[in-house]
Every structure is written in structure tokens, then in C-alpha cells.
Amino acid sequence: MSTKEKIKMKVALLGDSIFDNRRYVNFDHEDVEHVLKESGVDCKLYALDGAVIKIIPFQIEEMKKEIDSISSVFLSVGGNDGLGALHLIQQNLSTDEFFNSFKEQLNDLYSDIYKFKNSRNIPVHVLNIYYPCFDFAGSRMLEEIRNPQFRDVIIQSVDRLNEVIKETATKYSFGFIDINSEFNEPQFYANEIEPSYEGSKLLTKLIRRVI
């Protein structure tokens, strides 16, 4: 299938700035939504930059208004929840309470998604969280990520979050996309944590591979 061949389905994009990355790229057509459409994938962006798990139900309610035209759902969430706990890492405080809460919130969210997945027979695919680009050479967004003292702990924390995401996705028979193994070059980043134009193209490739 050529990159310009039309895929006759509408993809719903739920979640955070992994999909809603328009403010971090140089031009409007470089964000994930537009790159997907340019590749021939009809999609609707419900994701919102900065969204955390508790915000996703509001996106789902918006999506339900157009559910009859949705043929596949992609969800990226959890990264901002992790960033919110970064201060615990910096202060060397226990993160067990955070991880337990993360697991409970994610399970509740996936349970809600599972209900309409079954009622509508709509495939759901969830993305995991990728590591920050610790040595990003361009504009800086999060200086604390660059501190070598916390690098290993941040990697371990991302791995722990991704274990929860994968286990919960498997529990509810959702598709799972490992973007962490794919975001492995600085070119995919617009700053330490957001997708660049090349990142948009990479995400488009991964979504097209699934659908």
C-alpha cells in the first residue's frame, strides 16, 4: 500500500501531546493529525496537550458523539502523569503510592473503554511511554530531565509505567504499540519529550502498520 493510498476508515486519536503535538513542531502540517491525513488516514483528534488519565473520559464523551464514524481508536496517556511525579524522584521520596494510583486509574479508564469497544466492536490500540531525549541539543523544556543524577531512575520509572500499561492493555485485549523502542533517535523529538515532524511521521508509520 502506497503512503498516499486512501484508507477508508476514521481513526480516533485520544490522549495527550504524543498526538496533539502541533505547538511543538515548526509548521501546522507537521503534527501527527495532519501527517496521518496526508498519508491517507482519515482521523479525528480528541487528544489534548497536557492531558492526564483523569481527563481522557471527557475525550471519550466527545468521541461518542461521532462513534458511528469511528473504526479504530488509538490512545496515548500516562506520560504527563509520570511527569507529575518527577518531583518525588528528585527528592528521593517513595513513589509506591503514585504507581499504585496510576495502576488503579489506568485500570478504571481501560475498563470504561472496554465497554464501548465490545458494544461497538471497535479495535482499541494503546501506546506506551517513551524515554525522554536526555541529550536533546535544541530548545530546552525540562532542565531537570538533563540531570545525570536522575537519568537511571527516570528510565526505571518509565519502564515501570510501561509494564502497567502493557499488562492492563493485555487484560482488556487491547492492541499494544511499543513506541518506546521506536523513539530511539534525537530527530524524533521536538524537545526533550515531544514528537517532532520526524516523530509525527514515525507515529503515522506505526499506526498505518496496525490498521
Image (spheres, rainbow, N blue to C red):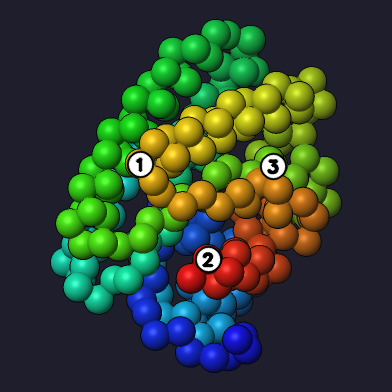
Residue 167's x, y, as percent?
48, 33
The residue indicated by pointer 2 is: 210
Kindly indicate the quadrant of the structure image that contains residue 111: top left
46, above or below 94, in the image: below
Mark closer to the observer (3, 1): 1
Task: Say which residue appears at 82% left-offset and 26% top-offset.
Answer: 148
Q: Which mark is residue 172?
A: 1
Q: Looking at the image, which is closer to me, 108 or 154? A: 108
From where the camera sits, is residue 154 visible? no
Mark closer to the observer (3, 2): 2
Q: Tag 1 or tag 3, which sits nearer the N-term?
A: 3
Residue 42's x, y, as percent?
41, 80
Q: Tag 2 or tag 3, which sits nearer the N-term?
A: 3
Q: Which mark is residue 79?
A: none
Mark count: 3
Q: Amino acid at mark 1?
A: Tyr
Q: Amino acid at mark 2?
A: Val
The residue indicated by pointer 3 is: 132
Cα separation, mark 3 vs mark 1, equals 28 Å
Task: Please tell me whether mark 1 sits on a helix, a strand or a loop.
Answer: loop
Task: Say which residue appears at 37% left-offset and 79% top-offset.
Answer: 9
Q: Quadrant of the N terminus?
A: bottom right
Residue 144's x, y, as percent?
69, 30
Q: Amino acid at mark 3?
A: Pro
Q: Tag 1 or tag 2, which sits nearer the N-term?
A: 1
